[in-house]
């Protein structure tokens, strides 16, 4: 079986609309906690936690445990890679369609 690359991991992770929305909220915040992400999202805390595990595994976010709170933030290197990937995919789709 072929090894999954970092680009594959980012694409697979951001393919889910809810996970992408969670990631967008993290990117827009300097730091945000799970409780803040859950509040008003219409998604359960356990579902948010599951999405966060996927985002961490893809290297898109980092956490900083601080007692009971765990502030989350984006990892700038991977966020830039995701933006470049998004631009490339948009150009490809524009050409293909």
Image (cartoon, rainbow, N blue to C red):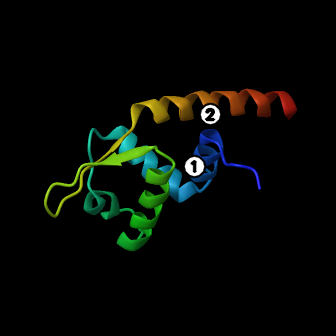
Task: State which quarter of the image contains the C terminus.
Answer: top right
Which residue carries the number 2 mark?
86
Q: Residue at x 45, y 66 (%)?
A: 50
Q: Residues within 10 Å of mark 2 (few under 14, many from 20)?
A: few
Locate residue 7 relative to residue 93 in the image: left or right.
Answer: left
Element type where label 1 sits in the image: helix
First along the sequence among labels 2 and 1 = 1
Query: Residue 66 appears in which quarter of the rendering?
Result: bottom left
Name the residue at 51% across, 56% down.
Answer: 19
* Total marks in image: 2
Q: Secondary structure at mark 2?
A: helix
Locate residue 42: give its quadrant: bottom left
Residue 14, disc: 1
The reply, left or right, for residue 49 in relation to residue 84 is: left
Apparent side of residue 65 relative to residue 74 in the rendered image (left or right): left
Neighbours of disc 1 within 10 Å: few (<14), some (14-19), many (20+) = many
Q: Residue 84 appears at what percent x and percent y? A: 59, 27
Q: Position of residue 47 (x, y in %)?
A: 44, 70
Residue sitting at x 24%, y 49%: 64
Q: Quadrant of the N terminus?
A: bottom right
Figure check: 2 above or below 46: above
């Amino acid at each position: 079986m072929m090894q999954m690359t970092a680009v594959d991991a980012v694409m697979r992770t951001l393919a889910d609309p809810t996970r992408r929305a969670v990631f967008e909220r993290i990117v827009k915040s300097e730091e945000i906690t799970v409780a803040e992400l859950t509040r008003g999202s219409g998604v359960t805390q356990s579902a948010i936690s599951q999405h966060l595990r996927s985002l961490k595994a893809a290297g898109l976010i980092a956490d900083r445990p601080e007692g009971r709170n765990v502030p989350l933030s984006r990892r700038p290197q991977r966020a830039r890679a995701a933006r470049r990937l998004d631009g490339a995919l948009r150009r490809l789709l524009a050409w293909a369609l």
